[in-house]
Amino acid sequence: MSQKLVELFARAKSENRALLIAYLPAGFPTVQMSHELIEALVTNGVDLIEVGYPYSDPLMDGPTIQSAVEIALLNGTKAKDVFAALKKVNDLGAAGVVMSYFSPIFKYGIVKFLDQLAEVGGAGVITPDLTPEEAELWLTEMNKQDLAQIFLVAPSSTDERIESITNKTSGFVYVASLMGVTGVKTAKTDMAKQLVARVRAQSDLPIAVGLGVNTPAQVKEIAQFADAVIVGSAFIKAVLEAPDEKAAILAVGELAAGLAAATSRE
């Protein structure tokens, strides 16, 4: 369990709001600009950033994030760039976790990866393709570093499966609002609300809802029943559609500010 995440969720609860979580791949659209985008996100109300570890086969991700990841890979983005981005997040006073498929972490070296993650102030890791049954060594090493292992549950998850996942999860539970990949469909808030209720019946962990969340109206609705709202493709799209770097930074900051304002439960 990460104490940083515990304190972050407690502060948001005391302020009667949900956390705003943003996803951004390291090295996108360049290594330097990714740091500027991180600053734009944090200064405009994002509480936690999922720093993506670029990978050549992002199975969970739709075309928007795939495009961003491909750009990052073409830039030669490596693990050191992931850690540098996390340090930037930490230096700005926000929390950062890594969003990564397990293959690049395994290739890099589990212990080495987690040692460096802890060194730069990272709070945990989201691994969409790692199941709890295959994570014993991983979980043991993470616990040594006070890092959170964040697993996902989906609308198709049975109650038994939710119980087995949440028993191995720390930090928060990532609830997928719909079936499919990121950025293609719009979040189904009714489905998400039902799934959140099922997870709460099994666990006291905070719950973050993601996939298909793009607008302040969606954030406002989800914030009424979830502890955090995750937005990824909307930020990537804002960068991809901007005419230049300055416009991209402004667009991301404006989007973040609008989404952050919608996290209030008042």
Image: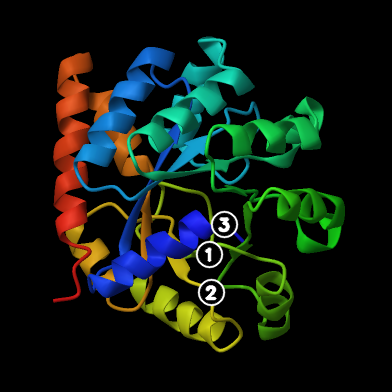
| Residue hosting label 2 | 205
Q: Residues within 10 Å of mark 2 (few under 14, many from 20)?
A: some
Q: Earlier in the sequence, mark 1 or mark 2?
A: 1
| Residue hosting label 3 | 2
Q: Which SS class for mark 2? A: loop
Residue name at image x 40 percent, y 28 percent = 88
Tell me where residue 110 appears, x and y as whole percent: 79, 37
Identified by mark 3, the residue type is Ser
Number of numbered discs overlaid on the protein picture:
3
Tell which tag, 2 or 3, sits nearer the viewer.
3
Judge left or right: residue 73 versus residue 10. right
Identify whether 241 is placed above or below 21.
above
Cα distance in 3D space between marks 1 and 2: 6 Å
| Residue hosting label 1 | 172
Q: Which SS class for mark 1? A: loop
Q: Quadrant of the N terminus?
A: bottom right
Residue 146: assigned label: none
Tell me where residue 18 appears, x and y as whole percent: 30, 66
The picture quadrant where one finds residue 56 is top right
